[in-house]
């Protein structure tokens, strides 16, 4: 069986920036084991699979080690493929997913994803996080991920956590964040439990981060930078109980795989 596969750099203006995602359009769902094997073979932080439905598309995302409930950059990448390669001319794309209906629109080169907000709650900092970062006084919150707050952007940039410790945590991953000078805030994201030591740009994490920083900064429109090695800029807008997450994407590769 031959399948089309696209590799798209999401939250990027040029190739080799942002977060690369593999996108695989399907006529019908493959067995879960096969989709997981394809994701492991791609060895990217996420591989997205989608099928057409009566109302739009259904989408699923697989990290190298497991399926995930929500992924922002691979949704952005999938929308890029649908709009710009497959030629869908609708004003908005609706994805049915395990996290509900996700809507993506495109204006010029900017793709905007409408995701449900995930307000975070303060929690005790797990011992594994304290040990991983070597700091005893870290402030922490949680929702889908643990969110760890640093005082300065430089602290986020310099962090070198112990991935073995982070892999012991019970949630999807750990986002570390701080206020920034050129942006509203900066972020790094680690998910070794799913085979991703550091994710270049983690779109779905902004459903947790944006509501927090919007409240702290007293604004509804935010511009953030994920300061991974590849880096990426993420625009966020708070609209009631939703977060609109926007960015650009570019195609790196188009291929045919045989499985």
Image (tube, rainbow, N blue to C red):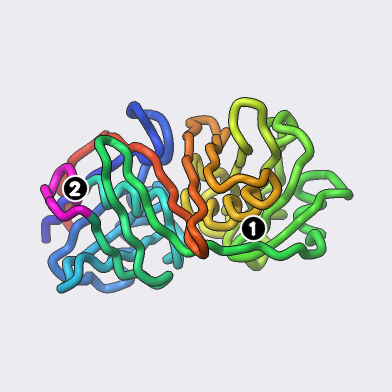
Residue 83 numbered mark, or none: 2
Residue 242 on image: x %, y %: 48, 61
Residue shown at 47% from the left, 49% from the top: 203
In this figure, which residue is indicated by the disc labeled 1?
Answer: 167
Q: Please determine whether, in this image, residue 245 is positioned above or below residue 145.
A: above
Residue 151 on image: x %, y %: 79, 38
- The answer to whether residue 164 is visible is no
- The answer to whether residue 28 is visible is yes
Query: Could you tell whether 34 is left or right of 238 in the image?
Result: left
Local SS, label 2: helix
Query: Per the image, is 230 magenta?
Result: no
Q: Please determine whether, in this image, residue 255 is positioned above or below residue 32.
A: above
Disc 1 versus disc 2: nearer the observer: 2
| Quadrant in the rendering for residue 106 | top left
Residue shown at 65% from the left, 67% from the top: 170
Q: Earlier in the sequence, mark 1 or mark 2?
A: 2
Residue 171 on image: x %, y %: 62, 65
Residue 10 on image: x %, y %: 37, 41
| Quadrant in the rendering for residue 124 | bottom right
Spatial CA distance of label 1 from label 2 is 36 Å
Report the magenta residues as a range.
82-91
In the rendered view of the protein, which quadrant contains the C terminus? bottom left
Q: Residues within 10 Å of mark 1 (few under 14, many from 20)?
A: many
Magenta-colored segment: predominant secondary structure: loop
In the rendered view of the protein, which quadrant contains the N terminus? bottom left
| Quadrant in the rendering for residue 180 | top right
Query: Per the image, is 84 magenta?
Result: yes
Local SS, label 1: loop
Residue shown at 13% from the left, 66% from the top: 27
């Amino acid at each position: 069986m031959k399948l089309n596969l696209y590799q798209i750099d999401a939250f990027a203006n040029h190739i080799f920036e942002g977060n690369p995602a593999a996108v695989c359009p399907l006529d019908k769902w493959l067995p879960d084991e096969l989709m997981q094997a394809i994701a492991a073979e791609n060895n990217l932080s996420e591989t997205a699979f989608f099928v057409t439905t009566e109302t739009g598309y259904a989408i699923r995302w697989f990290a190298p080690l497991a399926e995930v409930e929500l992924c922002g950059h691979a949704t952005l990448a999938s929308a890029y493929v649908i709009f710009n390669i497959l030629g869908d001319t609708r004003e908005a794309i609706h994805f049915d997913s395990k996290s509900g209906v996700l809507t993506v629109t495109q204006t010029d080169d900017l793709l905007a994803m409408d995701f449900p907000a995930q307000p975070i709650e303060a929690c005790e900092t797990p011992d594994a996080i304290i040990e991983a970062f070597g700091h005893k006084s870290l402030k922490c919150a949680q929702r889908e991920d643990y969110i760890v707050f640093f005082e300065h952007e430089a602290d986020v940039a310099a962090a070198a956590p112990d991935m073995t410790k982070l892999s012991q945590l019970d949630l999807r991953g750990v986002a570390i964040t701080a206020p920034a000078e050129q942006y509203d805030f900066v972020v790094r994201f680690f998910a070794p439990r799913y085979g991703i030591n550091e994710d270049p740009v983690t779109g779905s994490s902004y459903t947790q981060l944006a509501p927090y920083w919007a409240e702290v900064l007293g604004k509804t429109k935010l511009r953030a930078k994920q300061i991974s090695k590849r880096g990426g800029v993420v625009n966020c807008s708070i609209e009631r109980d939703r977060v609109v997450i926007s960015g650009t994407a570019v195609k790196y590769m188009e291929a045919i795989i045989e499985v």
